Amino acid sequence: MILEDTICAISTPPGTGAIAVIRIAGPEAINISEKIFRPASRHKKLSEQRAQTIHYGSISDGQKEIDEVVLSLFRAPHSFTGDDIVEISCHGAIYIQQKILNLLIDNGARMAKPGEFTQRAFLNGKMDLSQAEAVADLIAARSESARRVALKQMKGGFSNQLINLRAKLLEFTSLIELELDFSEEDVEFADRSQLINLVNEIDRVLKKLIDSFSLGNAIKNGIPVAIVGHTNAGKSTLLNALLQEERAIVSDVHGTTRDVIEDVMNIEGITFRFIDTAGIRETIDKVESMGIALTYNKIKQASVVVLIMDARDEDKKIHKAVSDVKNHMNSGHQQLIVVINKTDLVSPDTIKKRFSEESFRELTGADAIVPLSAKHHTNLDHLVRELLKTVDTGAIDNDEVVVTNARHYEALKNARDGIIRTRQGLETGISGDFIAQDIREVLHYLGEITGQISTDEVLGNIFKNFCIGK
């Protein structure tokens, strides 16, 4: 990347709208804009105006006026990228947007690459790498919780924590490496007991951050909820009731759903990704059998499994289904909600007698049982409450750092491996040069997250997924 270049791009979504914003950044941003901008007050010169000011006028191609615009002026280093920046707000016609963009290019700017504005902000020290990645997460946020997590990270909550830990480790490794220069004199500059305390502290922090990824990943991508059960139990009816639209085909014919249907729903700021699967039953139909195999696969992948049964089914059939699903679930954080559907077809006394949680010894921990009628939306709110219970939002509510990025998660795991080796080395009295090597590895992985240590390949992979105007 050449930071001396001046770049431009449309920063608003593609297509026609009321207005569009075209962003220009770089050392010649103001001069290039001045060549095509005609201020309403003719005595004004854009290059002479103060920073953080707004100007009304028009964009012209020679003597031909293209559009009336509002132009915002930001001077280095007090801008998003750290460069001079001009933002032109014009009318949203596609022709006008492209015409202004072409005029800027004709006068010396070039088209920005995906994420190049944010990448410049990183390279100019306006933000670290984890904050830059949070910009993309904030733009892509589909729920309140995803917005809150991304905004906290963009403001440096995550990186500040890592930078502090890294600074403490760096001080100790410097002392250990100094000892190596005086190895023949058998001196210690680094207090080993203090280092063990620091290593234990860092280990606790890293473990907490690593453990938060399961929540962060679910918040970012949506909590996967697999809706499973026998054919004609009402899985598709339940999905339609939750989404409040006819998303899945509902029929009395067994085996209607043969593939996986997915859709998302936002509930109180949390995104749930519902997966309607093929009904489980014995079948000789090859296509339906493939759908059933996919159902068992989705059970393993889901964070929450909703098993839906017909209230008229025999107890033996229901309990066998619960056991079968539990056997296909992975141990750990997966939770099961047993939905007893079609309660409108049985008496309230039958529901109370047969379908209490005490009647289902197979259920453990946070598992739950919910009787309802998907067709009539009866007790649907109970199911929604149980779904919300499966998400521990305490970390978000307490404004704690939550890891949402898979790259950060991998680096944190590698850093913790190094910390564990460092602690083992200190406890066994291993040579200082080996301890220093382990600490350097931890420093490397922590630095990868914030961008203190980075490569062009890593930066390219990160910023290529940004939109061009950001």
Image: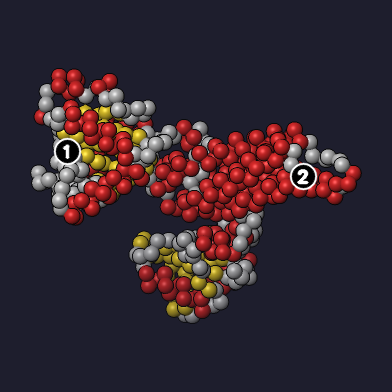
Give the residue type at disc 1: Ala
Point 60% across, 44% down: residue: 417
Residue under circle 1? 233
Where the N terminus falls, by quadrant?
Answer: bottom right
Callout 1 environment at 10 Å: few (<14), some (14 to 19), or many (20+)? many
Point 48% across, 67% down: residue: 9
Q: Position of residue 244 (x, y in %)?
A: 22, 42
Residue under circle 2? 432
Going by the image, does 304 lie left or right of 351? right
Going by the image, does 165 lie left or right of 312? right
Is residue 287 visible in the rendered structure shown here? Answer: yes
In-front residue for pair 81/148? 148
Furthest residue to the right? 185
Point 56% across, 64% down: residue: 457
Is 254 rendered above or below residue 50? above
In-front residue for pair 134/314? 314
Going by the image, does 348 lie left or right of 201? left
Q: Nearer the viewer, mark 1 or mark 2?
A: 2
Q: Position of residue 66 (x, y in %)?
A: 42, 73
Instruction: Identify the disc placed on residue 64.
Output: none
Give the residue type at disc 2: Gly
In-front residue for pair 14/152? 152
Is residue 237 visible in the rendered structure shown here? Answer: no
